[in-house]
């Protein structure tokens, strides 16, 4: 591992920690059956690996979630999901 790579990882982890602090997870009640019926399996599309790489690259450059979502054509929730999945993998 090079020193630059380790510094990049440190910066990413620091940014993720800040991001986690900004987003307070609220305990929402389970959505009603009516709410669940509006979301079908067709509405949820997998995110392509190229888009994931783009999101992570933009995030490492320090862009805001809104900017990343706009540039990658994803929702803010999808953007957060990609970043969170990467963090959980420990990369």
Image (spheres, rainbow, N blue to C red):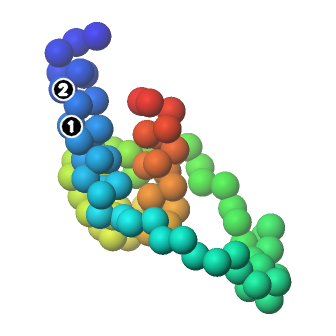
* Residue 16, horizontal then vertical, whole percent: 32, 47
Q: CA distance from mark 2 to mark 1?
A: 6 Å
Q: Give the labeled residue for mark 2.
A: 7
In the picture, the quarter occupied by the C terminus is top left
Q: Residue at x 17, y 15 (%)?
A: 3
Can residue 78 be seen in this snapshot?
yes
Can residue 38 be seen in this snapshot?
no
Answer with left or right where residue 13 lies relative to residue 80: left
Q: How many marks?
A: 2
Q: Residue at x 29, y 47 (%)?
A: 17
* Residue 42, horizontal then vertical, whole percent: 78, 70
Position above or below: 64 against 61? below
Position above or below: 60 against 43? above
Indicate the quadrant where residue 10 lies: top left
Answer with left or right where residue 38 lies relative to residue 25: right
Q: Which mark is residue 11?
A: 1
* Residue 12, horizontal then vertical, whole percent: 27, 39
Q: Residue at x 23, y 21 (%)?
A: 6
Check if mark 2's residue and mark 1's residue have beta carbons within 8 Å.
yes
Q: Secondary structure at mark 2?
A: helix
Q: Residue at x 48, y 71 (%)?
A: 26
Q: Which mark is residue 67?
A: none
* Residue 1, horizontal then vertical, whole percent: 28, 10
């Amino acid at each position: 591992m090079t020193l630059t790579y380790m510094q990049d990882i440190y910066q990413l982890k620091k940014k993720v920690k800040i991001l986690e602090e900004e987003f307070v997870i609220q305990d929402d009640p389970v959505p009603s059956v009516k709410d669940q019926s509006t979301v079908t399996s067709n509405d949820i599309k997998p995110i392509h690996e190229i888009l994931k790489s783009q999101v992570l690259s933009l995030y490492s450059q320090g862009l805001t979630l809104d900017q990343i979502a706009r540039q990658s054509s994803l929702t803010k929730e999808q953007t957060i999901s990609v970043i969170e999945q990467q963090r959980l993998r420990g990369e």
